[in-house]
């Protein structure tokens, strides 16, 4: 595992290895979207990751898509996150925060009755969302007016400033998995006319405005971006996902980001399409990839120059000492899907470490 253990320069940070933790929503807050000591323990257990990318976090009030997810729009939330970042740093780790807006994946029952917003009034079909009143179908979102979009950008800017105050090492803008920025990017969910709909450049306009606003707070070299052009999760589609991915990769170069974090596949099943190759060809910065990698495949992918680092999701969820296990060639714990989104410590901070680790 020679390549996985080479240091990697990400902006001003030197990552000690290339085994990164992918963002994982775990719904462990208890009230008011407040991060807490339990979350601090969870992340601290995993602090040997080259980089921890903390879970999707609400940039603005009224946009919750997961019951009990964290936010970063209130002073109390900033204090809660300080527990997490302080503890991770004392353990020698590095941690970015994933900033997001759920768009049409939000639900009125999670948001005091507020109707979700989106680029176009198209509901997520054939799926449900967990709410205090049980699983519910998604609702038809309200189409955002062009003059409301500066408010969305301002929400990301404010959250970026809050993340800085909370002691993170950087932020990752969530442009993936069918949430608001991805809903704008892909033409299955964006049917707008005008400056934010139609061409790739128009569909990417909001994302680029958000990146600029967040980079103005952090410096671009501490801002990452996550994309998932092939993911059909959340009823997403695009007429030319490979073309969109390659085009975006080229357009992103001048942003001089910390990294681009590319999900190579589709949660809903195998795909023949390849976005990794065209993105690697056109993107000149640090490229992190993710989705379904074993340690051996990750090692080979870095060795073959396909990417610079690999983010592990479920393997890190179930193995707080994933880095040590890979180094020692030890088997990995299996994840328990039943506790992915349940409250409390079970399935969150009780996965075993290697004996003697
Ligand atoms: C429980 C769970 C929560 C997740 N939460 C997020 C999230 O908050 N943000 C995100 O971008 N992806 C999220 N994902 C996707 C993961 O980051 C990752 O892309 C996925 O698990 C595939 O990688 P893997 O095969 O290494 O697990 C989540 C996945 C799971 C299983």
Image: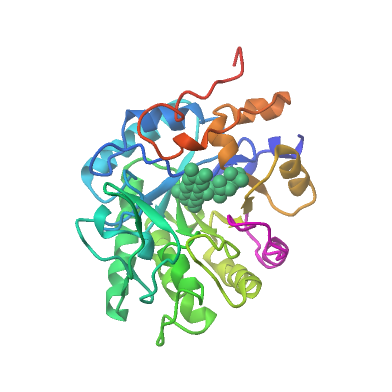
Position of 324 relative to 220 (above/below) = above
Q: Is residue 211 above or below residue 320?
A: below
State the image quarter where residue 212 is shown. bottom left
Residue farthest to the top, as pictured: 356
Q: Image quadrant of residue 206?
A: bottom left
Q: Quadrant of residue 26?
A: top left
Q: Position of residue 254 (x, y in %)?
A: 56, 68
Residue 291, percent across and down? 62, 50
Question: What percent of the width, then of the height, locates residue 225?
Answer: 51, 58
Residue 283 part of the magenta segment: yes
Segment colored magenta:
264-286
Specify whether residue 304 is painted magenta.
Answer: no
Apparent side of residue 147 relative to residue 45 in the rendered image (left or right)? left
- What residue lies at 45% left-to-right and 77% top-to-bottom? 190
- Of residues 105 and 96, the one nearer the viewer is 105
**Residue ID at (71%, 23%):** 328
């Amino acid at each position: 595992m020679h390549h996985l253990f080479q240091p990697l320069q990400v902006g001003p940070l030197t990552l000690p290895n290339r085994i990164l933790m992918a963002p994982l929503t775990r719904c462990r807050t208890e009230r008011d979207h407040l991060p807490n000591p339990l979350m601090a323990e969870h992340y601290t257990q995993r602090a040997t990751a080259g980089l921890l990318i903390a879970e999707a976090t609400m940039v603005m009030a009224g946009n919750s898509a997961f019951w009990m997810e964290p936010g970063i729009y209130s002073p109390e939330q900033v204090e809660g996150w300080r527990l997490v970042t302080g503890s991770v740093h004392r353990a020698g780790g590095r941690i970015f925060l994933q900033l997001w807006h759920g768009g049409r994946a939000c639900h009125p029952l999670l948001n005091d009755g507020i109707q979700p917003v989106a680029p176009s009034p198209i509901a997520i079909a054939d799926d449900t969302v967990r709410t205090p009143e049980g699983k519910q179908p998604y609702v038809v979102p309200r189409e955002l007016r062009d003059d409301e979009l500066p408010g969305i950008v301002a929400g990301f800017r404010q959250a970026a400033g809050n993340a800085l105050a909370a002691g993170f090492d950087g932020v990752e803008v969530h442009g993936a998995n069918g949430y608001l920025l991805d809903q704008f990017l892909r033409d299955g969910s964006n049917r707008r006319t005008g400056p934010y709909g139609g061409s790739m450049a128009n569909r990417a306009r909001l994302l680029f405005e958000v990146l600029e606003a967040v980079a103005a707070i952090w410096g671009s070299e501490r801002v990452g971006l996550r994309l998932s052009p092939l993911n059909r999760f959340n009823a997403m589609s695009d007429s030319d996902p490979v073309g969109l991915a390659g085009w975006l990769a080229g357009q992103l170069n001048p942003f001089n980001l910390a990294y681009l974090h590319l999900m190579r596949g589709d949660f809903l099943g195998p795909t023949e399409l390849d976005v990794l190759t065209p993105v690697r060809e056109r993107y000149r910065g640090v490229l992190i990839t993710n989705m379904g990698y074993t340690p051996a495949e990750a090692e080979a992918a870095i060795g073959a120059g396909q990417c610079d680092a690999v983010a592990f999701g479920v393997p890190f969820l179930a193995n707080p000492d994933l880095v040590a296990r890979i180094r020692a060639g030890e088997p990995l714990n299996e994840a328990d899907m039943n506790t992915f989104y349940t409250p409390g410590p079970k399935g969150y901070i009780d996965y075993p470490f290697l004996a003697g680790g």
